Amino acid sequence: MARGIVIGVVATFVGLALCAYIGLEAGVMPANADAKPSKLERWMARTSLRATLAREAPRVPNPVAATDANLIAGIRLYAANCAVCHGAADGTPSRVARGLYQKPPQLAKDGVEDDPEGVTYWKVDHGIRLTGMPAFGGTLDDRQLWQLALFLKHMDSLSPAPQRVWKAIKS
């Protein structure tokens, strides 16, 4: 009897895996960028990201001081690398951002100021799988990654000089 149960369980899992494979091969799961993701897809992506960030994001204070010069450097890096997807101070998505799936958060509106800087650093460094968020670790150095994290942490409380630079950026 126990052997029959084991065979039944194994056969069920093999059958489910085979159905999933056939469904993927048949194109049942949409691959187009403008399709709405399923609840399962959203849950899997969020769960994986949350677990990875808990395990891998730096838990150290930002080694870059919160000076106007570092904030302005972070703003300029944001303008050159991030604004096309995540928008500028006005919170309006660019034409590129409007066509992306998943919709990138417009950071001036949606904000990341409450995220620990280590989490922001990790996301910019490694990117986020299945979202279109690229990994900048191969193109930006460690100091630049921390400057970006610094700016994003303080983007809603900038002093006048960085605020002028931030307001001048266009989506």
Image: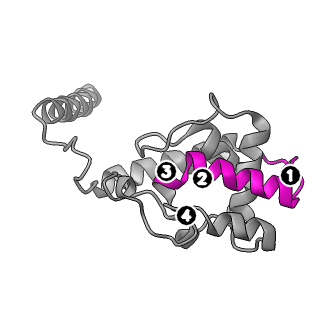
Rendering coords of residue 132 (x, y %): 42, 43
Q: Counting other residues with Cα less than 10 Å from the Cα at mark 3, is it few (<14), some (14-19), or many (20 or more)? A: few
**On the rendered structure, is 68 left or right of 73?**
right
Q: Earlier in the sequence, mark 3 or mark 2?
A: 3
Residue beneath label 1, please?
A: 61
Pointer 1 with pointer 3, Cβ within 8 A: no
Pointer 3 with pointer 2, Cβ within 8 A: no
Residue 47 is marked as: 3
**On the rendered structure, is 148 left or right of 64?**
left
Q: Counting other residues with Cα less than 10 Å from the Cα at mark 4, is it few (<14), some (14-19), or many (20 or more)? A: many
Between residues 99 and 128, which one lies in front from this camera angle? Answer: 99
The residue type indicated by label 1 comes to: Pro
Q: Earlier in the sequence, mark 1 or mark 4?
A: 1
Q: Earlier in the sequence, mark 4 or mark 3?
A: 3
The residue type indicated by label 2 comes to: Ala
Q: CA distance from mark 1 to mark 3?
A: 25 Å
The residue type indicated by label 4 comes to: Ala
Q: Earlier in the sequence, mark 2 or mark 4?
A: 2
Pointer 2 with pointer 4, Cβ within 8 A: yes
Nearest to viewer (mark 1 / mark 4): 4
Residue beneath label 4, please?
A: 88
**On the rendered structure, is 41 left or right of 149?**
left
Q: Which residues are magenta?
A: 58-84
Between residues 85 and 7, which one lies in front from this camera angle? Answer: 85
Residue at (43% x, 48% y) in the render:
45
Q: CA distance from mark 1 to mark 4?
A: 26 Å
Under circle 1, the secondary element is loop
Q: Is residue 30 magenta?
A: no
Under circle 4, the secondary element is loop
